[in-house]
């Protein structure tokens, strides 16, 4: 959990949260693609994670979700519907006539990829289950070792 930071007038905090969701989504998409690629290339996935951790690309998303992706542990601590909602709100803001236009092509892509989780019936899985969407795009269908949903009412 991050620290409390004053962002400004009413609505600024929500906009900051949406920006944070964009960065987190970028990292989840990148990690999902990197692990899918590494497996396709025949690499040891835990070694790949350790290599990434030690470089500039190491980040909290890798720490929180990397091993879970490898181990197929898709238990949720939060739900993809909330992420899709936040990304959608960000895209709605930039499309409104009042605010002017702000192109966010990657945010739109992230929203679509996470929406695919919902369409695939994986809405109650953890965000790390995004790797299943990337795998499906590559014709890979694996079993899900752990998909127990943690009660997260009010998250």
Image: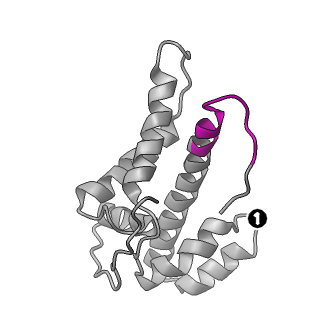
Residue 85 at x, y percent in the picture: 41, 44
Can you give x and y, in whole percent of width and height, for residue 91 in the image? 46, 32
Q: Quadrant of residue 80?
A: bottom left
Considering only vertical position in the picture, is 28 above or below 11?
A: below
Q: Answer above or below: position of 121 versus 148.
A: above
Q: Residue 145: x, y in percent? A: 34, 86
Left or right: 105 with respect to 52? left
Q: Quadrant of residue 147?
A: bottom left
Task: Answer above or below: position of 66 versus 86.
Answer: below
Task: Pick the quarter of the image with the N terminus.
Answer: bottom right
Residue 151 in percent (x, y) is at 38, 72
Residue 8 drawn in magenta: yes
Is 122 drawn above or below residue 116 in the view shown? below
Decide if residue 65 is on the left or right side of residue 72. right
Q: Which residue is mark 1?
A: 56
Q: Residue at x 50, y 58 (%)?
A: 29
- Residue lying farthest to the front in this orientation: 154
Dot 1: what SS? loop
Span highlighted in magenta in the image: 5-17
Pointer 1: residues within 10 angstroms few (<14), some, or many (20+)? few
Question: In percent of the image, x 68 and y 78: which residue is there?
Answer: 51
Seen at 69% across and 59% down, the residue is: 2
Of residues 127 and 27, the one nearer the viewer is 127
Q: Is residue 125 magenta?
A: no
Q: How is the image coloured?
A: one colour
């Amino acid at each position: 959990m991050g620290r409390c930071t004053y962002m400004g007038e009413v609505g600024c905090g929500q906009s900051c949260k949406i920006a944070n969701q964009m960065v987190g989504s970028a990292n989840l998409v990148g990690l999902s693609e990197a692990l899918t690629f590494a497996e396709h290339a025949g690499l040891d996935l835990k070694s790949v994670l350790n290599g990434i951790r030690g470089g500039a690309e190491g980040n909290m998303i890798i720490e929180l979700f990397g091993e879970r992706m490898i181990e197929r542990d898709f238990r949720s601590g939060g739900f993809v519907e909330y992420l899709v909602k936040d990304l959608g709100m960000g895209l709605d803001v930039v499309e409104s006539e009042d605010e002017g236009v702000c192109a966010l092509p990657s945010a739109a892509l992230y929203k679509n990829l996470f929406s695919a989780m919902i369409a695939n019936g994986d809405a109650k899985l953890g965000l790390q289950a995004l790797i299943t969407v990337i795998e499906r795009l590559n014709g890979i269908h694996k079993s899900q070792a752990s998909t127990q949903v943690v009660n997260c009412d009010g998250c």
